[in-house]
Image (spheres, grey):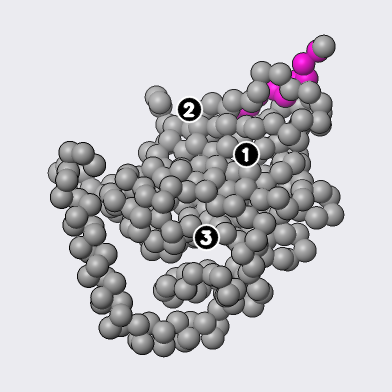
Amino acid sequence: MAGIGEARIRVPDRIAQGDIITVNSIVSHPMDTGFFRTKDGDPIPAYFISDVVITYGGDEVARFEWTSGISRDPVVTFTLKADREAPLAITWKDNKGGVYSQSVNIAFARA
Amino acid sequence: MAGSPELPRRSFLQTLALASAGLLGSAAIARSGRLLGGTVPRGPEDPEIPNEEVARIYRERFGGRTITRAHVQLDMPAVAEDGRIVPVIIESDLPMTADHYVKGIHLIVDHNPDAHLAGFYLTPAVGQVSISTRIKMKRSTWVRAILETNTGELWADYAKVLVTLNGCG
């Protein structure tokens, strides 16, 4: 992926009210542990996403607490009970103050 | 693996060496296990608490409460060839209703620099417990997925993962 913080969220194409849907997400981030060095021997400082907050229609539905043990360009898949039409938003925060957000609209398929 | 025929043999020999060393050291290990066990709650099917860091996580996060191996499925590869990217799937059949739900999932990798690798805190709005991600692993070790319900019950599953390439540096 490209620049740090670029993010994508994927939800099913057709959602019916009440479905428990699978939400896939990815954010571009190096997730440096602080244990590696560059080719010149300089230490690479720890640089990783530490907090993830998921909201649905503005209500917090989940929150993740991460360390640099999550792989580079973190992916996370979770579920959501789609009981109303509302935006689903994810905010990722890193240990250097970076804040990255992405959202999708949960809308129900018309028959 | 095809490109490095020496690797399986080497790891086999290492395993053998570790196994024989383990026989000699088992009395000492049993003693230290008892020492740690005195302060750490452990179910009969739990893997041994391997170090003070994991013992500390157990004390701080779970207090003296019993952890039972049930209701949780931790899916991981038995062998992770690249420790930088190891897939993890955590699922549970526990309910996610307003009255009874899983409020937290703790993912612990015994021999990683940050043993408490991640916490996933949920609400009934997610509908069910199904989380997947990709993690880094330093070396072969037990991985623990411990779920806490809103009423304070603790449920777990464990997976032993063999790591070929150190993913933590």
Residue B28 percent across, percent down from the top left? 35, 86
Residue B15's mark? none
Question: Alpha-carbon distance for marks 1 and 2?
Answer: 19 Å
Q: Can you identify the residue that label 3 sits on?
A: B158
Number of numbered discs visible in the structure rendering: 3
Q: Quadrant of the N terminus of chain B?
A: top left
Outermost residue on the right side: it is B99
In-image side of A21 versus A1 (left or right) = right
Q: On the image, numbered disc 1 is attached to which residue? A: A78
- Mark nearest the camera among 1 and 2 is 1
Q: Amino acid at mark 3?
A: Tyr
The amino acid beneath tag 2 is Glu
Does residue A59 appear to the left or right of B55 in the view shown?
A: right
Establish if A59 lies above or below B167.
above
Quarter holding residue B44 = bottom right
* Camera-side residue of A20 and B22: B22
Q: Is residue B34 magenta?
A: no
Classify 10 Å Cα crowding around label 1: few (below 14), some (14-19), many (20 and above): many
Q: Which residues are magenta?
A: A102-110
Task: Identify the residue at image location x=41%, y=88%.
Answer: B31
Q: Residues within 10 Å of mark 3 (few under 14, many from 20)?
A: many
Q: Mark 3 vs mark 1: give the one in front.
A: 3
The residue lying at 27 percent from left, 64 percent from top is B15
What is the CA distance from the residue labelled 2 to the residue labelled 3?
A: 33 Å
Tell me whether marks 1 and 2 sit on the same chain. yes
In the rendering, at what x and y percent does residue A26 appear?
50, 32
Residue pointed to by mark 2: A6
Residue under the image location 62 percent in, 48 percent down: B91
Furthest residue in direction top, as rendered:
A111
Say whether mark 3 and mark 2 are on the same chain.
Answer: no
